[in-house]
Image: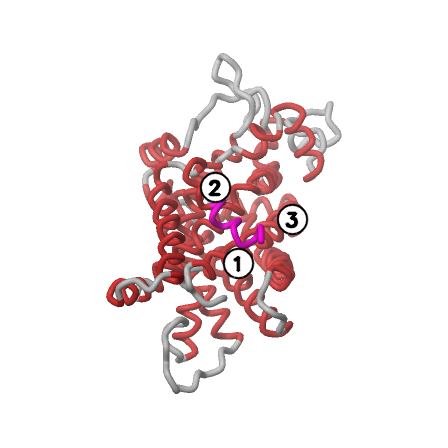
Amino acid sequence: LYLRYLPTIIASSLITLTPPAALAPCAFVSFLLLRSREVGNQPGPPALHGAFIKMSLWREFAAAGPGCAAANGLLNCFETTKVKLQLLHRYKHSFASSEHHHPLNAAYETPTMRGIMTQITKEEGVVRGLMTPGLSASLTRSMLYGAYRVGLYSTFREYLAGNGHSNENNGNKKEREVALKHRLMSGVLTGGIGSMLSCPLDVVRTRLQADSGLIQSNNVYATGLRKGKAVRYRGMFQTLITIYKHEGLTRGLYRGASVTVARASLLNGAQLASYDTLKRTLNWDEGPILHVTCALSSGIIAQTLIMPVDTIKSQMMLGDGYKSVIQSIQRNGTFWLFKGWAPACVGQGTIMVLQMPLIEEFRRLLGVTAI
């Protein structure tokens, strides 16, 4: 019973947690949740009912955005840790010191997932150091990116398979079988579209997480990767404006867009295709057990496949180019491409476990068929 009402609670809480840019989608979702129950439980005028049914694609958007935002917001700590792990080498010269066993970065005595999270917790606290860095950008991005990558998935999948819209009533028309290639292509396309639209927010989120640390009264970082350096960014909107003013659009807000879109396309294709395929293979009844099992498996599979692209993306978003990436591989070896794999898999698997059941429940409440 709790799972049935959880999406409504999450949707309401997001209105207070999400920045202004995402308030409208959250309010719209709350309206749709209430409206879906009214339409489903009361006769109502036929015209109103028909108009609501025609909003199928919008309902798919509305079901996907809040689910993605809630999951990513709750697990922002793993994303922060992953970004810091991936960028340790970038501050090699700034922090090289013979006093530490790990000269790559004196800001963190033990450059591992557990070591970094433990040290950040001691120095900055869990909320300030791990949960909130880049949170506003992460939530706003998730609302936009999630709405496209998951909300459009079923529609693209059915069209690619030749079945029309996933929620259309095709009468006696026999539906064609949806193959793995249709699922993969659908995930790749929707992930690419969503990523291209939300790339500036991804750049902002990455930089805020990389720079995060305690700030002294003289406006200099006391902890973190930029320990001893002046503060560059203060918040989501200020970061957007600063990057645009100093670096422009293509070299700033869309820095590394090619890698970002490639990463998102591969990740979404692997995530949703494996999730969708596992659901059909297991053939269990629709419910939390099926959703959680398939979500966890698909999250780990997808993150492992895209880990090298993920690492390259993080470096390029900090302002580096392909030449710097090649130099990093030469210095640190190919294993560097999988730096941060553990927190990334923990984060991605957990995000999927929270995200997909929520999205499936939102879809049920809004009268949309399961993925």
Residue at mark 2: 320
Q: Secondary structure at mark 2?
A: loop
Residue numbers of the magenta segment: 1-10
Q: Quadrant of residue 277?
A: bottom right
Do the CB atoms of the residues marked 1 and 3 lie less than 8 Å apart?
no
Q: Quadrant where the N terminus lies?
A: bottom right
Please say if 211 is above or below 254.
above
Dot 3, crowdedness within 10 Å: few (<14), some or many (≥20)?
A: some
Q: Quadrant of residue 244?
A: top left
Q: Amino acid at mark 2?
A: Asp
The answer to whether residue 193 is visible is no
Do the CB atoms of the residues marked 2 and 3 lie less than 8 Å apart?
no
Dot 1, crowdedness within 10 Å: few (<14), some or many (≥20)?
A: many
Residue in view at x 62 percent, y 74 percent: 283
Name the outermost residue toward the right.
101
Numbered disc total: 3
Residue at mark 1: 267
Residue in view at x 51 percent, y 57 percent: 361
Q: Secondary structure at mark 1?
A: helix
Q: Amino acid at mark 1?
A: Leu
Residue at mark 3: 346
Give the alpha-carbon distance from disc 1 to disc 2, as whole Å.
22 Å
User: Which of 241 and 52 lies nearest the eye of the viewer?
Assistant: 52
Nearest to the eye among marks 2 and 3: give it. 3
Please say if 49 is above or below 351.
below
